[in-house]
Image: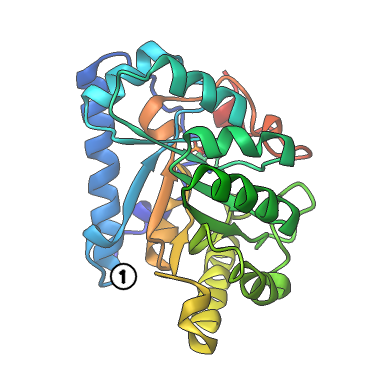
Amino acid sequence: MSHAAEMPTTGVAYPTAESVEDFGRAIATVRTRIARAAGRAGRDASEVRLLPVSKTVPEDRIRLAVRAGCRALGENKVQEAKRKWQNLADVDVSWSVIGHLQTNKVKDVVAFADEFQALDSIRVADALDRRLQAAGRKLDVFVQINTSDEDSKFGLEPDQALEFLRQLRHRDSLRVQGLMTLALFTSDTERVRACFRLLRTLRDRARDLDPELIGPGELSMGMSGDYETAIEEGATVVRVGQAIFGARPTPDSHYWPGTAPEPGNVA
Ligand SMILES: *Cc1c(COP(=O)(O)O)cnc(C)c1O
């Protein structure tokens, strides 16, 4: 096993993709690393969905990424996602909202999102369910769990997961796909790995108790700095932004208040 391949890439300067070719190369590199990580875990790379995360990326560059093969995009903030969805209406791409949601933004999510990965309150679940019923549609959702025990991260406490999943059973328009998490932001791979393991354990426990609680039992975990570790621990969805689009000008503290800015994320 190559040790270097396991090193978190946090802090590495991600080059900014500026052409279809740049995007093609960046995506190919990520896919190769996905395949290697899957191989190390005895898994097939086809079990892992790559969700490119386009937050802060302007629409002209998103168009290049789509031409290079991106068919789904993840966005953290609803406002930004909605603007891009409107301005890219001519592009065949599905939108995944992966950031914390307030009830006053629920109607926007119902208007354009194909997936919501950060469900962590019954209030939001109820608001979504009501709007979805009215719109006559369903929505794929992931329940977000705080596996790192950090106050700055959103998500349910691990010991609340099962009860929350039980409560979701009565919200018929929400199609539970599985669990989502953000690991600890650290270069200590073993501590990152422990977060991913915890998510997998919770998924397995729910499945053992009642497979209907967790649908296909997906695990959305892993970002640019730690997706290979996540895949080794069973990720079925990895959310990768900077390794595809390039380093972000905004520090992570913009998305997770209280998080120390990562050197690799600051322009
Ligand atoms: C931004 C973001 C990611 C991707 O992070 P990168 O470091 O750009 O790969 C993943 N998940 C969530 C929830 C995000 O907001």
Could you say where residue 76 lies in the image, as x and y percent from the top left?
57, 35
**Dot 1: what SS?**
loop
Could you say where residue 34 lies in the image, as x and y percent from the top left?
29, 52
Could you say where residue 261 lies in the image, as x and y percent from the top left?
68, 32
- Image point 64% across, 76% down: which residue? 162
Within the image, what quadrant is residue 3 found in? bottom left
Pick the quarter of the image with the N terminus: bottom left
Is residue 151 depicted above or below 56 in this figure? Answer: below
**Residue 77 appears in the picture as rendered:** no
**Left or right side of 50 for 198:** right
Q: Amino acid at mark 1?
A: Ala
Within the image, what quadrant is residue 231 found in? bottom left
Q: Nearer the viewer, residue 18 or 9?
A: 18
Which residue ends up furthest to the top in the rendered image?
A: 60
Q: Which residue is mark 1?
A: 41
Could you say where residue 152 lies in the image, as x and y percent from the top left?
76, 46
- Image point 26% across, 69% down: which residue? 43
Is residue 145 depicted above or below 153 in this figure? Answer: below
Is residue 203 depicted above or below 259 in this figure? Answer: below
